[in-house]
Image (spheres, rainbow, N blue to C red):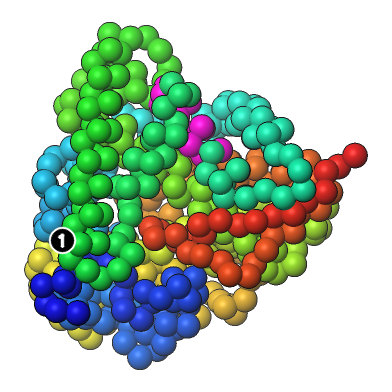
Amino acid sequence: MSSSDSVVDKGQLPKAIRSREGRLEPFEWYATMRRESPVHFDEQRERWDLFRYDDVNRVLTDHDVFTSDRSRMGTDSANDTEDGGSILRTMISVDPPDHNRLRGFVNDRFQPGTLREYQPRIEELTKALLDQIDGTTFDFVDDFAVPLPVIVIAELLGIPPERRDQFKDWSDALVARPEERSAAAVKRVREQRQQAQQEMGRYFATLLEERQNGTGNDLITLAATTEELTRDEQIGFCMLLLLAGNITTTNLLTNALWCFEEQGITDAIRTGAIDRKQAIEEVLRYRSPIQSLDRIAVEDVELNGQYIQAGDIITGWLGAANRDPERFDAPEAFRPERRPNRHIAFGTGIHYCLGAPLARIEADIAFELLLDRFDTVEAELTDLQPIHSLYGLESLTCHYEVRS
């Protein structure tokens, strides 16, 4: 391949885990790096990689030294857009005091107590999806794990049902990674990401304009009527919630069934022999839907014997931290009864995932109703294909028998 045909995409995966096998099972590489090079500079990607729990935790919690301001990463980062616009400056990409303002106005709506009021509706939506499954085989991802979170977050936002498929396409484009290391592939992904951002931005701008004097209870109306945010920030808020509210939960649901079937414990969860909520927490640790988070050093700093300069990009590998033997007993074993289970699958510190309680509620309801509906569910775990964003599967074929 000539130099004109290749490009360094600084946001892509490390070379060691770019293969299908590496993306499905990066954990052996994590373990090697934790032992041999826990704070490692990747010259090709021009960033530092962290693998130990304590190091990742420090970087995620010390926002004075390690910022979330993604505008400092440059446009080569997979987390930024080509035009560098402000539309995606959201609560996850800024630090205090702006972070407190961007998150504070909606924080109460995502507390567990508030979300429990919405639980009956999530149950209705879950049952409706299960009603649509017929025959003896279905794709757990396409038929269940994808539509459920999309429908839930779309309803909370107040998005018309007919736009759900379009929003799924847009959110996929925003987090996509190039499937190959070529200039054409990277350019194509960036152009698709930019187009999706622009189209979503225009759509949300229209809805926000329509609802700026509204009295509804949906999140778009809440954003449109608050004086805490500018219009660009309102748009960014809506885009972030739609994106984070469906992809992460889709991967949690998919990875949960993957783990349950892999460990042969699906029936034990169905009968209650294994606590469902604890098992879901172990899924979050064992196969975290988000494997890494990025920060930027704002000053020169020493970390575990390595000297990081101001402006350097740092990737904290949550998937590696969640299997650190210094923090977890038998970390490579899936133990659904694990207590305590202080994983950081949803991040930590001020940027702890706003939607974590909603994801947990959705997963708990989804598996309660799924396993109650079907006598047996058997997933095909051969020839699995990883997604090209975050951590999950493209599909998961399931065979089932319906409860008579």
Residue type at the position of mark 1: Asp
Image quarter of residue 98: top left
Q: Which secondary structure type mostly characterizes the magenta part of the structure?
A: helix
In the image, 59 versus 180, the foreground residue is 180
**Residue drawn 50% across and 47% down?**
249
Does residue 62 appear left or right of residue 219 in this picture? left
Q: Secondary structure at mark 1?
A: loop
Q: Residue at x 45, y 24 (%)?
A: 162
Q: Residue at x 56, y 38 (%)?
A: 148
Sort mark 1 into few (<14), some (14-19) or many (20+) by Cα contacts within 10 Å: some
Question: Residues in magenta?
Answer: 148-159
- Where in the figure is residue 335, as x and y percent of width and height? 66, 69
**How far across and down, in percent of the image, does residue 151 sit?**
51, 32
**Residue at image location 45% in from the left, 50% down from the top:** 248
Which quadrant of the figure contains the N terminus?
bottom left
Which of the two residues, 273 or 175, is positioned nearer the viewer here?
A: 175
| In this rendering, position of residue 325 left or right of residue 337 | left
Residue with the mark numbered 1: 76
Q: Is residue 249 above or below residue 323?
A: above
Given residues 61 and 193, the one toward you in this image is 193
Q: Is residue 283 above or below residue 276?
A: below
Q: Is residue 226 visible?
A: no
Residue 114 is at least partly visible in this image? yes
Quadrant in the rendering for residue 255: bottom right
- Residue 90 image position (x, y, % from top left): 24, 41
